[in-house]
Amino acid sequence: MDVNQPKQEHLLALKVMRLTKPTLFTNIPVTCEERDLPGDLLNQLMKDDPSTVKGAETLMLGEMLTLPQNFGNIFLGETFSSYISVHNDSNQVVKDILVKADLQTSSQRLNLSASSAAVAELKSDCCIDDVIHHEVKEIGTHILVCAVSYTTQTGEKMYFRKFFKFQVLKPLDVKTKFYNAETDEVFLEAQIQNITTSPMFMEKVSLEPSIMYNVAELNTVNKAGESVSTFGSRTYLQPMDTRQYLYCLKPKQEFAEKAGVIKGVTVIGKLDIVWKTNLGERGRLQTSQLQRMAPGYGDVRLSLETIPDTVNLEEPFDITCKITNCSERTMDLVLEMCNTNSIHWCGVSGRQLGKLHPSSSLHLALTLLSSVQGLQSVSGLRLMDTFLKRTYEYDDIAQVCVISSKVKEEH
Amino acid sequence: GASYSSLILGPAPDLTYHGALSCTISICSTTFSSCPLPDIGVGSQVPGPNCSILVATGRSSPTEEFSGDAVKDLMLRFLGEQAAVKRQVLNASSVEQSFVGLKQLINSKNWRAAVDLCGRLLTAHGQGYGKNGLPTNHTTDSLQLWFVRLALLVKLNLFQNAELEFEPFGNLDQPDLYYEYYPHVYPGRKGSMVPFSMRILHAELEQYLGNPQESLDRLHSMKTICTKILENLEQGLAEDGSMTNITQENTQASVELWRSRLGRVMYSMANCLLMMKDYVLAVDAYHTVIKYYPEQEPQLLSGIGRIFLQIGDIKTAEKYFQDVEKMSQKWDGLQYQIMVLMNRAFLHLGQNNFAEAHRAFTEILRIDPANAVANNNAAVCLLYLGKLKDSLRQLEGMVQQDPKHYLHESVLFNLTTMYELESSRSMQKKQALLEAVAVKEGDSFNTQCLKLG
């Protein structure tokens, strides 16, 4: 894949070979039974073949390593490794050889050479070797520029360059979805698709939250004391396969107050993805900061702090709410509780909650019970701002599962 | 050369003539041959049946001659006629026209010549070139010759040719492939005349043609039948489910035979799933294979470890390699020690540590200096460590010291790749390799690895 310069007789030759990890040689087993015409002949041939596994010649996957035969693909986040060899093709000694390897992208030029010192002399048929590594951080066209300068025996200074162009492709397609819970929690679903041509082992996919949030990853479950991945035995992604990772973000205490009032775009954090392919070839990517549009809450936001998942039929249970003033003016709030077919509030309706300043919140403990079994929606709270004589209605705040007390709750 | 005319499957046998056979045939289609094969005398004349009554159902025919010598062709191109003339290989005419000669050709890796000799021997059975459509019979001998010819075509990677020649045999269950079809030749014998190994070959061939699902389907059918036969035997019945009073001894022998055949089918399945890159199923399948080949447990577990290395799941690979190391109580001896060291080396590779991998491969050479894999792999590591010259020295040393073992295409691929990296004068060195190959290798040598274009 090299673009050659106009021909000129040089004493030195430069060769470049990309060093992707080697692959394992596979055999095609051809066997027969003793009673067949060839008898033991075919099996003996397989035993004599140096590339079969000794004692298990029928096993296709051998142990012989084969060097890469072509450049292959290279993806963002992988490490580009290459062998650079400068060989003295002539029969004279060459002096003061300097080999430089640079990587040119659309935005920058990086020096990759391990050593920047010149080699004093290179005898005939000898070579200067270098293996360069570079973690690819940009997509698109990359050009490896190798420059060789040397002095001939007669003192003439010579110089030549070779260019090797390659494309860096995108390895993953990441899509994100946000789900807002009834509480201040935000659930992030990250869909990651392998858009390369070989299977990928996902070593680590983690969410680094922004300073406002704490994150809990929901991609492992605890089974008998061990952390088992939700993806089970399928630890790798085939080409074009997609996986969904789930994270729960909770605003930190000091930001919890703010979170209720924040409008517009907030920064949630970024995904850090590490993967491996053939023989442990590593790749690593971080997404840009993921952003979420905060849902509008209106002037007054009512959110749930605590509520049980499951309650018994006709038995009172407690919930706590947080009422946040998201407007610019102070409010004087009165709480009204209305019963529905299934929800019955306990306590005094119509009580004053007191003044609530802008951006501040108050906590409220309430008791209620349900008279209908099944998944019930908590509804019927009303807040009236006495200043503006405006009423805010809150229905379907949360769901609760109501079971008959005769049925024991299973833990 | 011969011409190949497409097979025309004739109409089904006339029911009134074969009325007596029709019911037995339906049973036979679910069983394979279970009796020991008769003495195979190549070239034995088969008495022909009354051809006027039998309906010709078409016959397979060798498609063409395969003799040729890619090595000699390259020598003519690159080393000149004088050098090429010195190249001597056995061909189909230079050996005894019998199985003895065939064995010689196979042993000396002159498989192209062997394929042609099979063709000639089949001609003696009335199934030679250009005999398509003529009434002739299958015998156990002729089927074995077909098996050898097809097996060698697969070994030569001539998959399309093998597919073409397999075609007339259909799904290997046509009535004229059963003993009952030839009551005068095999009186009282029941079952299929097709060698089990030929069925395995027939199934495996599809994956090499890019149809692994078809391979799996065929293997599954074979698995079902083997399982049914074993069930029948366990219940004290004959293989085909009929009543029998065979001795306990013979039943035991039959059970062992069918169990090993079932194991071979499972092995094929696991390999096929691996080729399909269905790694989860492949790993499960190899675990099943261990049950049939417990003596191969360390090799199979190591192989599974290598599968995980290929996926990139280094941790699970490590777990498998550790499991193999824990077996030192059960296994010992040189082969096991080498396996453990080999696994350690591969783990280092997976952890990007070429220096440690090189050390581990070199450790193997200390206890087994002739180990081709360790030699090759150590040389490969040297390249990744920036030591091209040292790597070349190691591989060239290997090839010169023991050409019998080391003139293998995988080693030569590595060698020629490094020659091309070393200098612009790689052609000279590649031609030197050609000369070495010319002395040692038969007509089946895959010359692509020499990269002479």
Image (cartoon, coloured by chain):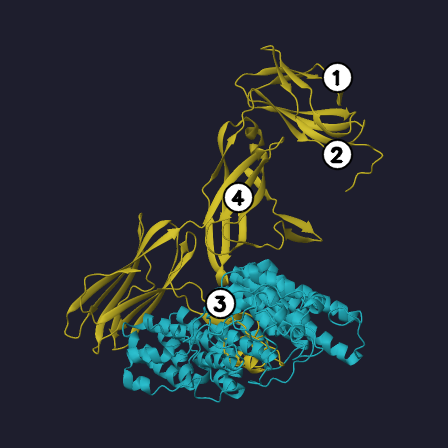
Chain colours: A yellow, B cyan
Quadrant where the N terminus of chain A is found in the figure: bottom left
Chain of the residue on which disc 1 is drawn: A
SS at mark 4 in the image:
strand
Taking the image as shown, residue A263 lies to the left or right of residue A338, namely: left
The amino acid type found where label 4 is placed reads Gln
Read off the residue under disc 2.
A310
Q: What amino acid type is highlighted by mark number 3?
A: Leu
| Residue closer to the observer: B380 or B35 | B35
Q: Which quarter of the figure has residue A89? A: bottom left
Q: Which residue appears farthest toward the front when viewing the image?
A: B52
Give the mark nearest the N terminus, 1 or 4: 4
Residue, disc 1: A348
User: Which residue corresponds to the image point at 39% horizontal and 66% vertical from the top-left?
Assistant: A69
Tell me where residue B23 appears, x and y as whole percent: 72, 66
Q: Secondary structure at mark 1?
A: loop
Instruction: Pinpoint residue B12: horizontal percent, then vertical percent.
Output: 61, 64
Tag 4 subunit:
A
Instruction: Give the percent coordinates (x, y) of residue B53.
Output: 61, 72
Residue B164 shows which numbered tag? 3
Crowd band around label 2 with a 10 angstrom C-alpha radius: few (<14), some (14–19), many (20+): some
